[in-house]
Image (cartoon, grey):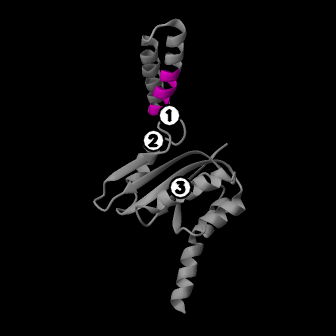
Amino acid sequence: MSDLIVIGFKDEFKADEVLIDLRKLELEYLIDLEDAAIVVRNKEGKVKIKQTQELVTSGALTGGFWGLLLGLIFFHPMLALFGAAAGAISGALTDIGIDDNFIRELGNTIEPGTSALFILVKKSTPDKVLDDLSKFDGKVLRTSLSKEDEAKLQAALTKLEAKEEFVDKI
């Protein structure tokens, strides 16, 4: 079962930065992301959602490939067009991962000039991932993690903030 984690950030670009970092960790097999999305609420209050899985496009490409292949085999080029259309429709009707309505609803609640990262985690190596996330200043907004794991995640995310407060006191 996957865990949903939503982390809020104080600026519009931090969620993108964290997702790039998580993608690097994914290449090192330290985390396995099933889905991810970013919500940015600009200073004017407009909400923009960035999905990492565009199913319509991938469905059209896959359908087009199979349609083209069948079209070449049976000498009927219209099969490629039909395959692309069928793939696009199937991609549009399929909604896997994080619910779009949930992303939109939560995106409307964050402050202007901020962002949020939605991740669906299949598995991870928590100690290494948490250590890497400690360089970002974020706040856990929602999660399906246990209370204990949520506390560890929040502690890792606020580690940077605690260091800055300590330096300011000196």
Residue drawn at (47%, 18%) of the image: 83
Q: Which residue lies furthest to the left in this view?
A: 44
Which numbered disc covers residue 19? 3
Please tell me whether residue 114 is drawn above or below residue 94 in the rendered image: below
Q: Is residue 67 magenta?
A: no
Q: Are marks 1 and 2 in contact (CB under 8 Å)?
A: yes
The residue wearing badge 1 is 95
In the rendered image, which quarter is residue 56 located in?
top left
Q: What element carries label 2?
A: helix
Q: What residue type is labelled 1?
A: Asp
Q: N-terminal of the two: label 1 or label 2?
A: 1
Quadrant containing the C terminus is bottom right
Numbered marks: total: 3
Q: Residue at x 53, y 16 (%)?
A: 69
| Residue shown at 43% from the left, 15% from the top | 82
Callout 1: SS: loop
Instruction: Write down the residue under mark 2.
Output: 100
Whether residue 23 is visible: yes
The image quadrant of residue 157 is bottom right
Q: Quadrant of the N terminus?
A: top right
Mark 2 neighbour class, 10 Å CA radius: few under 14, some 14 to 19, many 20 or more? few
Q: Which of 114 and 31 is in front in this view?
A: 31
Of residues 14 and 10, the one nearer the viewer is 14
Q: Is 63 within the magenta?
A: yes
SS at mark 3? helix
In percent of width and height, residue 71 lies at 49, 12
Between the C-alphas of marks 1 and 3, the distance is 21 Å
* Bounds of the magenta segment: 57-65
Label 1: few (<14), some (14–19) or many (≥20) C-alpha neighbours in 10 Å: few
